[in-house]
Image (cartoon, helix red, strand yellow):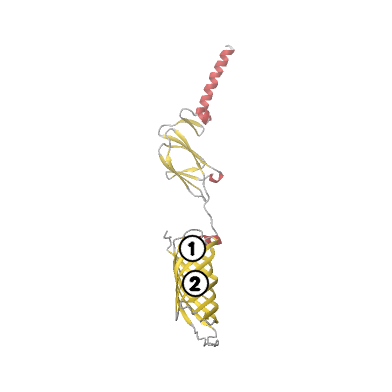
Amino acid sequence: MTYARWFFFCTILFSLVFSLSAQAGDCEFDSDCDKGRVCFSRNCKKLDKVESLLTVEPATATESNAGLYIDGAYMGNLPWTGIISAEYHEIRVESTGMITVHFNGESRSAASDTIVVNMEREPVVTGPQESAAIAGRDEPGTIFFALFGGGGYGVGGWGSDGWKRPIAALAGGGALGLRLPPKPIWIDLGLAISTTSLKPFDTTVDNGSRPAEWGDFVKINFGVLVRLLFPVKENFLYIGASLEPGYGMSGVNWIYGDLHLAMSLFLGKHFEIQVNPLGMQYLQDLAGQGYIVSYAARLGVAVRFPKNPLF
């Protein structure tokens, strides 16, 4: 046998062995699995029209070993490759501590598809942060009902002759209103009803023109309450200002305005502590005969409802 024949014979034999080897288990996806064939489990297989090759791969090491479910059936962990029917499928990937990922779609007939899964970790809140997060679930659109009380000290004047005396006051009342957007700024708008007991000192002192007979009295206030707060620690502690203008009735009628440094501390989802550590109140007699200027502090509690915001 000549060298040419030997070379031709060896070439044919090598091609036959290579082809059988590829069919038996050494196929390469790109070089051997053409013309509708796929390389699956190191074997070449021709996909039927009702079949599709699916590969589900993890985007990072985080998704490795995540559980794969196709149409509700557990198929194994990632990465995963298998032959499925060429039709609509629901795919779910689950892993402990990760947010479940869902895919829905139709696999292609006699073709291969690859899905890359990128999962995110579930938020973990523990310790003191958990209380703050629970408290902060209150959203704009909730109604609030507040009760408050406090006191103050200032100066009262009466008449055109410049009569002035120190004034002490105790106050208490309630408010009903609505929290308005936007976030994270906190805006409350409501109506307030309160009473204030005023006690002037040295009411019987004669100032030279007439006796200063101005006794103790109680006034009832009807006003508007506006609170504007900014987050120091969002969903937990807010600081801002509150303004309460209104009308007061007593032996004489008044208009008044309260301006306070305001703080709100949330200890529960719908429970709020309101602290106004420093404020000023001005009252003016409508007849123009008297006024009171006082510095006051106030403490209150508020309950917010309903559980789900109105808007």
- At numbered mark 2, what does the secondary structure look like: helix, strand or loop? strand
The residue type indicated by label 1 comes to Ile
Above or below for 47 versus 277: above
Residue 204, x across and y down, in percent:
53, 88
- At numbered mark 1, what does the secondary structure look like: helix, strand or loop? strand
Q: Quadrant of the C terminus?
A: bottom left
Tell me the crowding category of disc 2: few under 14, some 14 to 19, or many 20 or more residues within 10 angstroms, Cα based.
some
- Badge 1 is on which residue? 187
Above or below for 209 versus 101: below
The residue type indicated by label 2 comes to Gly
Give the camera-side residue of 302 and 262: 262
The residue lying furthest to the top in this view is: 2
Give the camera-side residue of 154 and 187: 154
Query: In terms of sequence position, does the residue under pointer 1 or pointer 2 come before the other?
Result: 1
Give the camera-side residue of 22 and 243: 243
- Badge 2 is on which residue? 257
**Residue at the spot x=49%, y=45% of the render?**
67
Residue 249, x across and y down, in percent:
44, 77
Residue 156 in view:
yes
Residue 178, x across and y down, in percent:
44, 64
